[in-house]
Image (cartoon, helix red, strand yellow):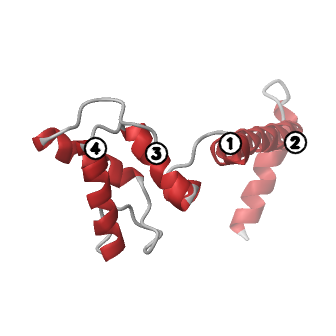
Amino acid sequence: MPPPLGPGLSGAQLEQATEALASELRCPVCQGLSIASSPSESAQAMRGQIRQLLADGYSPDQVVDYFERSYGEFVRLSPKPRGFNLVVFVLPVVALAVGLFLVALTVRRRSAAELPSKAGAGGSQGDPDTLDAYRERVRRELSG
């Protein structure tokens, strides 16, 4: 590991930085939990390592890099947006755009299909004979 980049942290600042980093890293035992929320002994040991590295003057990025070298990129709870991981960030946006396009297309087609049938069924305001015939047919159907 390269030398520390700055002075070591202590006190409340050390605890806050430790918790922040522990909430960004995945527990290798629990896998669905962060180190901060995992009750496993492995997670407790990793929290201790984080605390010690930060107290020694290592930056948060150096600490994350240290754990990535040990456990792989899987140790990050949210992957870096690059390479294949970019699909995780882009795919939902593309799916939403395609879905909105399909909904708009369906609404437009249904609206276009209903316009001629409404005009033919109800008649126009300028054609009272067609409207009267339609009303008479409705009265007959309702009366039985």
Find out whether the residues at labels 2 and 4 contact each other: C-beta distance under 8 Å. Answer: no
What residue is at 28 percent from the left and 43 percent from the top? 54
What residue is at 76 percent from the left and 47 percent from the top? 135
Q: Which of the two marks, 3 or 1, is nearer to us in this view? A: 3
Closer to us: 118 or 113: 113
Indicate the secondary structure of the residue bearing disc 4. Answer: helix
Q: Amino acid at mark 2?
A: Ala
Indicate the secondary structure of the residue bearing disc 1. Answer: helix
Q: Which of the two marks, 2 or 4, is nearer to us in this view? A: 4
Tag 4: Cα neighbours inside 10 Å, few (<14), some, or many (≥20)? many
Q: Is residue 53 left or right of residue 78?
A: left
Find out whether the residues at labels 3 and 4 contact each other: C-beta distance under 8 Å. Answer: no
Question: How far, Cα to Cα, is label 3 from label 4?
Answer: 13 Å
Q: Quadrant of the C terminus?
A: bottom right
What residue is at 24 percent from the left and 31 percent from the top? 7
* Residue 114 % position (x, y): 83, 42
Residue where numbered disc 1 is placed: 86
Closer to us: 92 or 80: 80
Q: Amino acid at mark 4?
A: Leu
Residue 113's label in the rendered image is 2
Q: Amino acid at mark 3?
A: Met
Residue 132 quadrant = top right
Residue where numbered disc 4 is placed: 54
Question: How far, Cα to Cα, is label 2 from label 4?
Answer: 67 Å
Indicate the secondary structure of the residue bearing disc 2. Answer: helix
Q: Amino acid at mark 1?
A: Leu
Question: How far, Cα to Cα, is label 2 from label 1?
Answer: 41 Å
